[in-house]
Amino acid sequence: MSAGSVLVAGGTGYIGSFTTLALLEAGYKVVVADNLYNSSAEALNRIEAICGKKAEFVQLDVTNEADFDKVFEAHPDIDSVIHFAALKAVGESGEKPLDYYMVNVYGTINLLRSMVRHNVTNIVFSSSATVYGDATRFPNMIPIPEECPLGPTNPYGNTKFAVETAITDVINAQRNNAIKAGNEAEAKKWNGALLRYFNPAGAHPSGIMGEDPQGVPYNLLPLLAQVATGKREKLMVFGDDYASHDGTAIRDYIHILDLADGHLKALNYLRANNPGVRAWNLGTGKGSTVYEMIRAFSAAVGRDLPYEVAPRRAGDVLNLTANANRATKELGWTPTRTLEQACEDLWLWTKNNPQGYRQQPPAELLAK
Ligand code: NAD
Ligand code: WQD
């Protein structure tokens, strides 16, 4: 099947920018739409420096439905959307749930309405392992398969669950309506991938592209990176009394390049196999504890990074590790990068770009 044009909503953000790179490298034409709330358009220059191809950029707010209409009218060749645009801070979602419902849920409803109006029929959605909530309540469900009952435990997770449900309902309705009208070929065009990511990690091995959040980071690896650069004195380890081999909580850290490749494979699968709506976990299947992460990142940096044990963080669970067999079997997706590589790539990015995209990287890295 020939590559078409793809709208990447939230495409200047961390995962969106790496997916845009993967799409361009695979021959897709890409239109990136973002309001730059948590990202910088400089990401697009770095993508071009790496692959020699350019994505078109449109500044768009997902809460404005007319913005999507304009993009689809200007680009009638777009047949698919990869939808990353969202607010993603779990803690903040408890303080400002309406902001999260507005951007994550209402924004996606706008997108879906506009897709239906313009016959844009494939959507790949950024869901999250957070939709499973505390999967350890089902002891036979670790590592977590897609069949694990969903049970998000915070407003952010609730918005992801709501959007998964809305996409499922809309795609199914589009299919049923087309079948009722006797048009089976039209029905098969409507497809959705619900990609449940575990913990994205790392940066591009060139050292010129990585995560550049606009505010204070709250994820483990970006915080460890700040300890390594001296921006932060030490890492606070949230709890050493979990039922793991070293007492700290277990997560499944997936290299950002493997995660981006999962989106490419999911999109290709939708376009070639017309599965309707399907969920896939994107994780490595291998869990690492907080202490193991501190050791792995310290090894990349070349010195032991300081930490202190603190109480458990509210809402954290013992173990979120993926069973990603479905993605391997159906999408032909297997993560190939190690945790050590993710840590090395993150450190190369961090030490060469202390101001993120607000500064140019060293010329010798750009020249490679
Ligand atoms: P990110 O913040 O880097 O990317 C999100 C992008 O959406 C940003 O570029 C931001 O500017 C944009 N955006 C926010 N509000 C917008 C609006 N109103 N209109 C248009 N654009 C808007 O985050 P990320 O880590 O790349 O996450 C991408 C997606 O993956 C999100 O949907 C997130 O919920 C999901 N996800 C992230 C993780 C993670 O740990 N990073 C894990 C699972 C799922
Ligand atoms: C990882 C581990 C912490 C910071 C979150 C969201 C999830 C998904 C990914 C979007 C945990 C521990 C952390 C620190 C620590 N995002 N930790 N000290 O919580 O697994 O997942 O991001 O969908 O929905 O909940 O990621 O990086 O915050 O934490 O000890 O300063 O590191 O307790 O065990 P988490 P994280």
Image: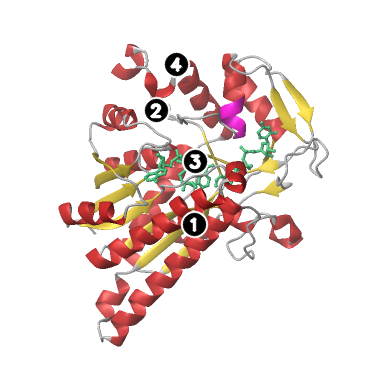
Work out whether mark 4 precedes mark 1 in sequence or the reverse, and give the earlier one: 1
Q: Are marks 2 and 3 in contact (CB under 8 Å)?
A: no
Q: Which mark is residue 209?
A: 2
Q: Main secondary structure of the magenta part?
A: helix
Quadrant for ligand 1?
A: top left
Determine whether the residue tagged by mark 4 lies in a helix, strand or loop.
Answer: helix
From what the image shows, is residue 21 above or below residue 158?
above
Determine whether the residue tagged by mark 2 lies in a helix, strand or loop.
Answer: loop
Q: Are marks 2 and 4 in contact (CB under 8 Å)?
A: no
Image: magenta residue range: 219-223
Q: What residue would you read off at disc 3?
A: 336
Using a 10 Å C-alpha cutoff, classify the residue at mark 3 as few (fewer than 14 neighbours), some (14 to 19) or many (20 or more).
Answer: few
Q: Is residue 358 visible?
A: yes
CA gap between label 1 and label 3 equals 14 Å
Q: Quadrant of the N terminus?
A: bottom left
Residue type at tag 2? Met
* Residue 121 placement (x, y as % from top left): 29, 65
CA gap between label 4 and label 1 equals 34 Å
* Residue 148 placement (x, y as % from top left): 64, 64
Q: What residue would you read off at disc 4?
A: 352
222 in the magenta segment: yes
Work out whether mark 2 precedes mark 4 in sequence or the reverse, and give the earlier one: 2
* Pick the front one: 317 or 162: 162
Q: Nearer the viewer, mark 2 or mark 1?
A: 2
* Residue 247 placement (x, y as % from top left): 80, 38
Q: Are marks 1 and 3 in contact (CB under 8 Å)?
A: no
Work out whether mark 3 precedes mark 4 in sequence or the reverse, and give the earlier one: 3
